[in-house]
Image (cartoon, helix red, strand yellow):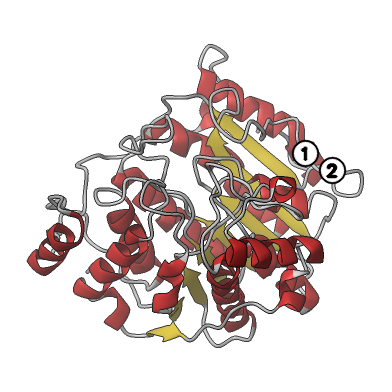
Amino acid sequence: MGGRTSCSLRVAWDDGLTAYDFGPQHPMAPIRVELTMALSRELGVLDAPGVGLLDVEPASDELLSLVHDPAYIEAVKRAGRTLEPDDAHMLGTSDNPVFKDMHDAAALISGASVAAARAVWSGETAHAANIAGGLHHAMRGNAWGFCVYNDPALAIAWLLEQGAKRVAYVDVDVHHGDGVQNAFYNDPRVLTISLHESPATLFPGTGQASETGGPDAEGYAVNVALPAGTGDNGWHRAFDAVVPPLLHEFQPEILVTQQGCDTHALDPLANLTLSVDGQRRAYAELHELARKTAGGRWLLFGGGGYGLVHVVPRAWTHLLGEAAGRPIDPDTETPQGWRDFVRQRTGELAPLYMTDGREVVFDHFVDGYDPGDPVDRAIHATRTAVFPSHGIDPSL
């Protein structure tokens, strides 16, 4: 473990969180969360000073209705009992198959995210995490993109109910954070920033730079649509050019982040080419931005990620280590006990190290814009679309 000062961190956890399971053929397998928690335990992250687990309980219907239509909540319950598809609510599609007790599993994830939000907002802890959460696609009245209930939107809505006036949401999943954006599209209390693969090549087909917020919140929806093939250096050039200036200007009371790790080169569902090392650096950057712009208050969620053995457990263990203020040295070997557990649970050989052996090096966008570079064009489009709404000169 690294030498940084430890931080207070609460991790929302219950074994029931792995019950969110669309079946053996579905890419979003709960084993990824199980392996993450096992690796975090083996590397001592969950036993670090200031770290503890949070008890969770399912979100009530009343709580869920902050972001979901009551008729949809009833439809989810019904589908989980009858196992029959419901086309009107997008339940029973190949992306969102129905499964037994679906409402209970999804409500528990939402409840865990609100428990994490409560722990930070109450001052119990500076940071709180629900790595089983981050289901950012679910809409008010339908399932979408592997997501039944939108736990990040629910946590933000709960914070607003408590009186929060400025909440920033940064989404680094490879897919556009469309459900969270939609929930707060016309609410200037919530700044949503999503860096994702271009909608021209990836689900859900939204997230252009031109999507900037409703009439009462112009500039409060921010989208960086990166070209397929973007790797560590281009991704971090884009992040650095967009996220810090906006957060410094917005000064949120709490920073909420969704850490989908499907940006990795090995992810089977998308086309960005980041390494675990690039993802690890993003976590450190977000941690520092929480400290500098949000009084240290950081609420963090998992999200997508379908490299079940080689990517997700390492990425999210780095995330939890970073949030604990005890970042893991990337040259650390994965523990033999964890490798054995991986072999037993999946039949696969586990990665041997916590690194992909990459180093992130990039030039700052403000030092020179190259209109021939598709990453720079994406950055330019976003800065031009939203910076003026925040009084920031997009050329500086």
Q: Nearer the viewer, residue 110 or 288?
A: 110
Q: Amino acid at mark 1?
A: Thr
Is there a contact, CB below 8 Å, between mark 2 and mark 1?
yes
Residue appearing at x 59%, y 64% in the figure: 80
Residue appearing at x 57%, y 59% in the figure: 83
Q: Amino acid at mark 2?
A: Glu
Answer few, some or many: residues within 10 Å of disc 1's Cα (few below 14, many 20 plus, some between 14 and 19).
many
Residue appearing at x 55%, y 74% in the figure: 108
Q: Residue 218 got which mark? A: 2
Where is residue 300 shown, x and y percent of the image? 51, 65
Which badge, 2 or 1, is on the more N-terminal residue?
1
SS for callout 2:
loop
Answer few, some or many: residues within 10 Å of disc 2's Cα (few below 14, many 20 plus, some between 14 and 19).
many
Which residue reaches farthest right? 215
SS for callout 1:
loop
Q: Residue 212 got which mark? A: 1
Where is residue 104 shown, x and y percent of the image? 57, 73
Where is residue 153 shown, x and y percent of the image? 68, 61
How far apart, in angstroms, are the residues tagged by discs 2 and 1? 6 Å
Please tell me whether residue 203 is drawn above or below residue 14 in the rendered image.
Answer: above
Please tell me whether residue 226 is drawn above or below residue 146 in the rendered image.
Answer: above
Q: Indicate left or right for 284 with 250 as reference.
A: left
Please tell me whether residue 261 is drawn above or below residue 385 in the rendered image.
Answer: below
Q: Indicate left or right for 347 with 202 as reference.
A: left
Residue 297 visible: no
